[in-house]
Amino acid sequence: MFRAIKTLIGLTLLASACATQAFPTQQAVPGGLLILALTSQNEPKPVVYYAGARVTVVPEGNEWLALVGIPLDTKPGMEQLEVNFGNTQQALSFEVQAKHYRTQSLRIKDKNKVEPDEDSSERIVQEMALQKRLTSQYVGEVSSIDFIRPIAGRDSGRFGLRRILNGQPRQPHSGMDIAAATGTPVKVVAPGRVIHTGNLFFSGNVVYVDHGGGLISMYAHLSQINVKNGEFLEQGDYLGSVGSTGRATGPHLHWSVYLNGTAINPALFL
Ligand SMILES: [Zn+2]
């Protein structure tokens, strides 16, 4: 109980400290990020789970902080983390606030990308399983949470938009769209290892990068991929070029960020 109170105070302090540091912004909403101080760094690093998924824990100041991705379909209200402090196991509660996301209507020329035929549907199911596997990896420690923008350009589609495609409701937007000319070089936002490159039905040519400790980034609709699976990238390395492969209305970069296997608003990292 005492620890729960202590972490809530930690939260308030963090909110002010974050403004001056290159640290993600906390927003405890569906599709957002909870930053929770767990314990002093003199203590062993806690192991945290949320809804069965391992949570990213990073050192900051003299504390261990949990970075908890909150799924977009979470209902506002109380949620719980399971925390193993080494010698004690505790459940910590946090509150998810409501957030309204806007609706975006788009017209897609390729009808099969909105109402996939049977072959495409089979492919989509397989690719969803692959994406689930890639985005829920937890390997080693986080390289850096101090992200750079992958490309300059106008934000053309915010995270969380409720999508209406050719008049039909579809999955909400799981990343950030940045409009740019075809061929614009795309930079990796932080150091990390390439864990997948290939072509997906909706995302087109993609690159997935594992930044360690459960933090993954993904770059979609590329016209060209410049990196290989297994390759280690330094922050700012070019991984490919902007394009409009997959389901896209025009050339842009779709950029996603995942924590504990859930897509969260990438803008919180900028
Ligand atoms: Zn997108």
Image (spheres, rainbow, N blue to C red):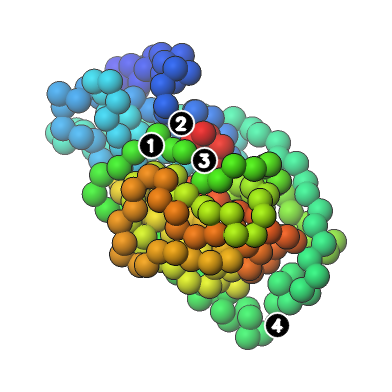
Does 150 sit left or right of 9 as displayed? right
Name the residue type under label 1. Answer: Ile
**Label pair 2/1, CB-CB below 8 angstroms:** yes
Which is closer to the viewer, label 3 or label 4? 3
Residue drawn 78% across the image and 74% down it: 111
- Above or below — where is 123 with respect to 133? below
**Which is nearer the N-term, disc 4 or disc 1?**
4
**Which is nearer the N-term, disc 2 or disc 4?**
2
Name the residue type under label 2. Answer: Pro
**Which is nearer the N-term, disc 3 or disc 4?**
4
Q: Which residue is mark 4?
A: 117
**Label pair 4/1, CB-CB below 8 angstroms:** no
Residue drawn 23% across the image and 35% down it: 46
Q: Where residue 232 sits in the image (x, y, percent)?
A: 30, 56
Does 73 sit left or right of 63 as displayed? right
Residue drawn 40% across the image and 51% down it: 237
Asked where in the image residue 182 lies, by quadrant, the reply is bottom right
Q: Where residue 236 sits in the image (x, y, percent)?
A: 42, 45
Q: Which residue is mark 2?
A: 24
How far apart are the two marked residues, 2 and 4, measured between alpha carbons?
40 Å
Packing grade of label 3 (10 A; few <14, some 14-19, many >=20) is: some
Residue 25 can be seen, yes or no: yes
Q: Confirm or reject: label 4 Cβ below 8 Å from ligand 1.
A: no
Name the residue type under label 3. Answer: Arg
Q: Which residue is mark 3?
A: 149
**Which is nearer the N-term, disc 2 or disc 1?**
2
Q: Which residue is mark 1?
A: 145
**Label pair 2/4, CB-CB below 8 angstroms:** no
Q: Where residue 131 sits in the image (x, y, percent)?
A: 47, 64
